[in-house]
Image (cartoon, rainbow, N blue to C red):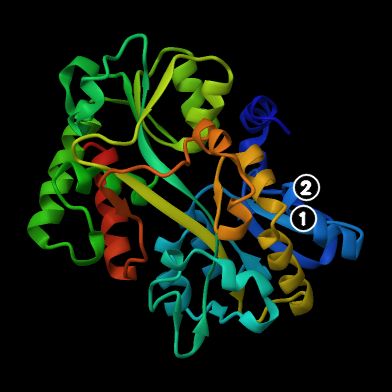
């Protein structure tokens, strides 16, 4: 599927996909982000088993966790790493046996550098994909000088013309960066309050909170929104369509980076062997190009990434960037709950 087809497909079906399951192999249920049923990353799995896994989709990390913690039974799930502590603390997952994952040795070391990801008990999370969150803007109507700072989101000039993600991780990465915090591992009460105050100011300019890249792309394509805090994939979609879009990843305060991956659900109902076949198919070298082409994300396998051209990485806005980066690393369940609750208040106007 091309980026253009992906945009049209997401726009038509994202809501349905977030709740529906795609039936295929009954022995493996993959709980994943809408749009992730990609043929190119399932090549080895389908070749071995004659069909793809069964998929059930979610729209964001909070929805996913709420569902599995309420009893939804999946074999593997695909959270972003900031949500990992919740899964561990709730006893929902078990370690992976990396002796059964040959490409584990080629995963980018920085994506494994946390005791929450791997510790004495084992490896709890297999990173698979990463990218950036930064400022998307209409280059025809927004001067580059305006997006040289994240305070563009609080600039009265753009009242009613901005969009932010309906995601606590993403909006807080923006708010912390804007208020001088580049590492959210040890945020003080004063820093949290300052970021919340800034976010309340930014909220005044928001026309809509977007929930998926196609929604953000449509808001910008119609001209309703001129500036958005965006993942790179939505920007790549607009760029491929010839829309005058810029993606400022090096403002004065910095940008955000995130990565996601798979957890091995405890007491899974399906086949453990097929769970490993699935993750090995996803980590295969040939999956990197498919992941970039279909969703615009970079692959965690450093050897696989060597097969991707520099031009292709630049077109997807996942080429390396020299700037301050706030990494959306794992946070405690308590801190995540605090971010979620405060964000809900801010969206409600409080």
Image-quadrant location for residue 70:
bottom right
Viewer-closest of 253 and 155: 253
Write the residue at 42% across / 53% down: 258
Q: Residue furthest top?
A: 140
Is residue 301 visible in the rendered structure shown here?
no
Residue 175 in the image: x percent, y percent? 22, 44
Residue found at x 21% / y 20%: 145
- Residue at screen point 58% across, 22% down: 240
Q: Would residue 121 appear left or right of 287 to someone viewing this image?
A: left
Residue 199's disc is none
The residue sitting at the left extreme is 190
* Residues under numbered marks 2 and 1 in contact, where contact means CB atoms less than 8 Å apart: yes
In the picture, the quarter occupied by the C terminus is top left
Relative to 41, residue 347 above or below: above
Which residue shows up at 24% across the image and 51% down it? 342
Q: Position of residue 163 (x, y in %)?
A: 35, 28
Name the one closer to the observer, 35 or 115. 115
Q: Is residue 63 left or right of residue 204?
A: right
Quadrant location of the N terminus?
top right
Q: Which residue is mark 1?
A: 42
The answer for how far apart the CA atoms under marks 2 and 1 are is 5 Å
Is residue 107 among the parts visible in the rendering? yes
Q: Nearer the viewer, residue 254 or 11?
A: 254
Q: Could you tell me which secondary element the residue under label 1 belongs to?
A: loop
Q: Is residue 250 above or below residue 167?
A: above
Secondary structure of residue under mark 2 = helix
Q: Position of residue 88 (x, y in %)?
A: 46, 77
Q: Is residue 350 above or below residue 67?
A: above
Which residue is under mark 2? Answer: 39
Q: Residue furthest right?
A: 50
Towards the viewer: 53 or 116: 116
């Amino acid at each position: 599927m091309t980026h253009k087809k992906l945009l049209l497909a997401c726009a038509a079906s994202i809501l349905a996909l977030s709740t529906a399951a795609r039936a295929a192999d009954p022995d493996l249920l993959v709980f994943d982000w809408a749009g992730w049923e990609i043929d190119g990353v399932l090549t080895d799995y389908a070749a071995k088993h004659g069909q793809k896994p069964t998929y059930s989709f979610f729209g964001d990390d909070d929805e996913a966790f709420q569902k599995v913690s309420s009893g939804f039974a999946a074999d593997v799930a695909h959270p972003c790493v900031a949500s990992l502590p919740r899964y561990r603390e709730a006893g929902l997952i078990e370690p992976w046996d990396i002796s059964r994952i040959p490409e584990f040795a080629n995963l980018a070391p920085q994506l494994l550098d946390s005791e929450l990801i791997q510790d004495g008990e084992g490896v709890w999370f297999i990173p698979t994909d990463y990218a950036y969150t930064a400022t998307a803007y209409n280059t025809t109507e927004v001067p580059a000088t305006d997006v040289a700072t994240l305070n563009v989101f609080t600039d009265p000039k753009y009242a009613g013309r901005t969009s932010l993600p309906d995601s606590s991780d993403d909006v807080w990465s923006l708010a912390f960066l804007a208020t001088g915090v580049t590492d959210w591992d040890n945020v003080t009460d004063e820093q949290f309050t300052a970021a919340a105050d800034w976010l309340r100011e930014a909220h005044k300019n928001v026309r809509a909170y977007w929930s998926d890249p196609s929604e953000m792309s449509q808001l910008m394509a119609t001209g309703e929104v001129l500036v958005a805090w965006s993942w790179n994939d939505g920007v790549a979609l607009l760029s491929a369509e010839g829309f005058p879009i810029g993606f400022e990843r090096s403002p004065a305060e910095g940008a955000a980076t995130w990565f996601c991956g798979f957890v091995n659900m405890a007491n899974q109902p399906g086949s453990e062997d097929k769970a490993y076949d699935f993750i090995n198919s996803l980590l295969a070298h040939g999956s990197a190009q498919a992941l970039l082409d279909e969703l615009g994300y970079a692959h965690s396998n450093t050897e696989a990434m060597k097969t991707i051209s520099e031009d292709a990485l630049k077109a997807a806005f996942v080429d390396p960037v020299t700037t301050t980066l706030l990494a959306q690393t794992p946070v405690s369940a308590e801190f995540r709950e605090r971010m979620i609750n405060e964000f809900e208040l801010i969206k409600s106007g409080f």
